[in-house]
């Protein structure tokens, strides 16, 4: 017993040493703080994005953000400002181009039109950029959470706070609108205003999330945690909380593994999220299949089994 206790104590000491090493550097403090806040915002807004079936909108805003970030790098302004301005313009464009019959949910045609225009503009900005902007463009595409500065952290803090305040205000009408836009409009819900506000919030989350996982991997925090949560539960409050917790766990796991390996953090965040989604989705399929088999048992067999017992 004494030898086992010694081994456990040594193992705990090694773990404690690794934790101290992990938080020894200031850039890791920034990474964990910014990553946690981004995961919080993405988990909340991602739940409504999956509920409304607007994953394409989130992906499109991420690509629109790429054009904004490359344009910002070209003229020498902060990338996050370019990301949000481009996302805001795209939200207005999607809202303005959608047919009136799609007031509750965005039309894919409008989203696709804005996306193609933004991609063309992004390509133009890349063509005009010189080699000194190459690293900035790479960070926009794939993220660079370990390079977040103190100023970036301040932007993320205030952006997340603003998003949570607005989401708390519009959550109930947005949920109603997401489930049945026709009835919501009949009940006096300001459909156009809520829909536009939601798109602006989505653009804000994309702008701050790109710093963590990049435009090409944005689904890791926006879609996957929310999809897992809605696979496991149908209760809205529980699903939102679970989506946030999963996004935070994936971010922390990616940061921890990435710190001790030479590979990019965004790869581990995405891989953890995707692996968990496969497990959750596969487990639900097995559970549903077994439940279906139980439902198929003839009533006479159940009565015979009860009488034999």
Image (tube, rainbow, N blue to C red):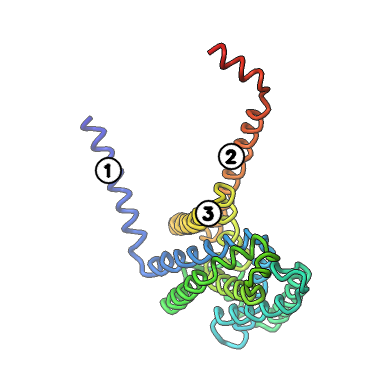
Give yes or no for contact between labels 2 and 1 (Cβ–Cβ under 8 Å).
no
Badge 2 crowding class, 10 Å Cα cut-off, few under 14, some 14 to 19, many 20 or more, is some
Relative to 260, is 270 on the left or the right? right
Name the residue beneath numbered marker 3: 239
Q: Quadrant of the N terminus?
A: top left
The answer to whether residue 295 is above or below residue 129 is above
Q: Residue furthest top?
A: 308
Question: How many neighbours does mark 1 have within 10 angstroms: few (below 14), some (14-19), or many (20 or more)?
Answer: few
User: Could you say where residue 258 lies in the image, as x and y percent from the top left?
Assistant: 47, 58
In this rendering, the answer to whether 265 lies above or below 12 is below
Pick the front one: 227 or 177: 177
Residue at the left extreme of this rendering:
2
Q: Which residue is mark 1?
A: 10
Report the Cα–Cα distance between label 2 and label 1.
37 Å
Front label number (3 vs 2):
3
- Residue that lies at the very extreme toward the bottom in this rendered image: 75
Q: Residue at x 43, y 77 (%)?
A: 154
Helix, strand or loop for disc 3:
helix
Q: Quick check: 131 left or right of 251?
A: right
What is the quadrant of residue 299 in the picture? top right
Identify the residue at horizontal 63%, vertical 37% (top origin). Answer: 288
Q: Helix, strand or loop at disc 1?
A: helix
Q: Where does the image place residue 300, in percent across and percent down from the top left?
A: 66, 18
Question: Could you tell me which residue is drawn at 37 percent across and 59 percent down?
Answer: 22
Give the mark nearer the N terminus: 3 vs 2. Answer: 3
Q: Position of residue 245 (x, y in %)?
A: 46, 56
Label 2 sits on a secondary structure element that is: helix
First in sequence: mark 2 vs mark 1: 1
Q: Tags 3 and 2 in contact by the CB under 8 Å rule?
A: no
**Residue carrying label 2:** 283
């Amino acid at each position: 017993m004494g030898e086992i206790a010694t081994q456990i104590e040594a193992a705990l000491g090694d773990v404690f040493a690794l934790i101290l090493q992990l938080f020894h550097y200031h850039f890791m403090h920034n990474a964990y703080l910014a990553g946690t806040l981004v995961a919080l915002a993405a988990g909340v807004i991602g739940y409504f994005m999956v509920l409304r079936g607007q994953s394409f909108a989130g992906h499109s805003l991420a690509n629109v953000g790429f054009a904004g970030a490359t344009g910002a790098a070209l003229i020498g302004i902060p990338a996050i400002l370019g990301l949000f301005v481009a996302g805001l313009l795209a939200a207005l464009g999607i809202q303005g181009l959608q047919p009136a019959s799609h007031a509750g949910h965005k039309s894919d045609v409008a989203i696709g039109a804005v996306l193609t225009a933004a991609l063309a503009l992004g390509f133009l900005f890349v063509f005009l950029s010189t080699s000194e902007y190459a690293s900035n463009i790479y960070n926009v595409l794939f993220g660079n959470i370990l390079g977040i500065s103190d100023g970036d952290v301040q932007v993320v803090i205030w952006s997340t706070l603003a998003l949570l305040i607005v989401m708390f205000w519009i959550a109930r009408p947005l949920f109603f609108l997401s489930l049945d836009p026709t009835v919501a409009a009949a009940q006096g819900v300001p459909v156009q205003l809520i829909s536009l506000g939601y798109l602006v919030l989505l653009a804000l989350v994309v702008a701050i999330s790109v710093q963590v996982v990049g435009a090409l991997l944005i689904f890791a925090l926006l879609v996957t945690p929310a999809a897992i949560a809605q696979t496991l539960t149908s209760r809205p409050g529980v699903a939102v909380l679970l989506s946030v917790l999963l996004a935070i766990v994936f971010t922390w796991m990616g940061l921890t593994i990435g710190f001790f390996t030479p590979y990019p953090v965004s790869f581990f965040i995405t891989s953890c999220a995707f692996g968990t989604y496969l497990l959750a989705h596969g487990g639900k399929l097995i559970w549903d299949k077994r439940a279906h088999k139980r439902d198929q048992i003839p009533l006479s067999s159940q009565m015979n089994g009860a009488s034999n017992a």
